Image: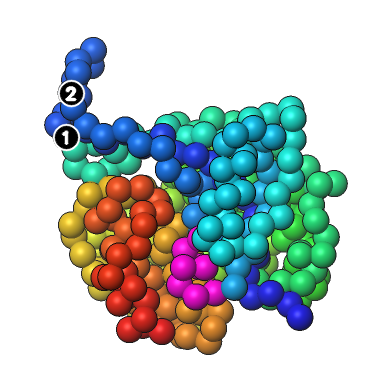
Amino acid sequence: MSKPLLVLGDFAWDVLIRTNSKLLPGGDTFGEVALAPGGSAANVAVWAGRCGLDTTFIGKIGRDRFGELAEENLREEGIRAHFIHTDAHLTAAVAVWIDETGERSMVSGQGADFYLLPSELPKRPLENTRHLHLSAWSFFSDPPRSAARQAAQVTKAAGATLSFDPGSFQMIAQMGAQRFIKYTHDLAIDIFFPNYEEGEALTGEKEPEAIARKLADIYPKAVIVLKLDAKGALVLESGQATHIPPATNNLIDATGAGDSFAGAYLARNLKGATTTEAANFATKVSAWVIEQLGARPPGDPRLKEIISVSA
């Protein structure tokens, strides 16, 4: 029997640094420093699982303590994992800087996930899933781009659908928008999950609906789900644009908000919810996330209520 969702990409450990006040160049301040599980692809897998979808993850980790912890983490989250192990590279780590306003910046170390090769892909999970989700963090360099593209081709040939998160406006700009599009437009993407800045970087447009419509020209099969942070989201499907209102403006930490949105959206949409229903649910889940610290904070009664009420 085919599995509902397969997510391929990065598992990384986030070193979260959050300041209580503005840090001046060469200065000092108090704040919070914590180690938390992350990685865009792994975050999506975990949030889809937390929202009730049977989810599988494929990624590459080092044979080190962080790799062991990664396996423990996904096991605890109930995510079926196919890890490729390597002695040549360490499990990925990311420095996440959260300023006093809650906005985050990241420096991603090139860990084992950056060295996933096509020959290392486990064939059976790819051929036995109904939907594959990819993150652009698997596309900004090669490897792992060839492996991610092959994964998309295998799953598409088996009849699966595909969603894609473009990952980072700054990395798109460094790579070049046209080059990025060259590597992604032929994948027959079914759901495209940009945020506003990524959409602007890919299209040059400023207005959300104009961004979404131009993205629909680039990815003609795709439902465009444009994340607009404090302004909610915009869904463009079959030429019809629908605005999804925000669920909160109380930003504590934006880390992982987009990943939680994608995971929650897929958890509902792949179970039959409409695009609008799925986006409304995803907005509520990501709103809860940005009021916590980290990409995958432990759940609480309010999160359980959001998930159960929207089920």
Given residues 102 and 50, the one toward you in this image is 50
Total marks placed: 2
Q: Would you say residue 183 is visible in this rendering? A: no
Asked if the magenta segment contains residue 263, the reply would be no
Quadrant housing residue 33 = top left
Q: Which residue lies most toward the top here? A: 26
Q: How packed is label 1: few (under 14 Cα within 10 Å), some, or many (20 or more)? A: some
Given residues 63 and 151, the one toward you in this image is 63
Residue 259 position in % (x across, y down): 45, 57
Given residues 275 and 309, the one toward you in this image is 309
Residue 170 position in % (x across, y down): 44, 39
Return the mark for residue 29. 2
Q: Is residue 106 left or right of residue 33?
A: right
Q: Residue at x 19, y 15 (%)?
A: 27
User: Three-letter amino acid code at disc 1?
Assistant: Asn
Q: Residue at x 57, y 36 (%)?
A: 66
Q: Secondary structure at mark 1?
A: loop
Return the mark for residue 20. 1
User: Three-letter amino acid code at disc 2?
Assistant: Thr
Return the mark for residue 86. none
Q: Residue at x 50, y 75 (%)?
A: 52
Q: Which residue lies most toward the left here? A: 21
Quadrant housing residue 103 = top left
Q: Residue at x 24, y 56 (%)?
A: 291
Residues at circles 2 and 1 in contact by the CB criterion of under 8 Å:
yes
Residue 11 position in % (x across, y down): 57, 46
Instruction: Look at the picture and state if 259 lies above or below 91.
Output: below
Segment tinted magenta in the rendering: 46-53
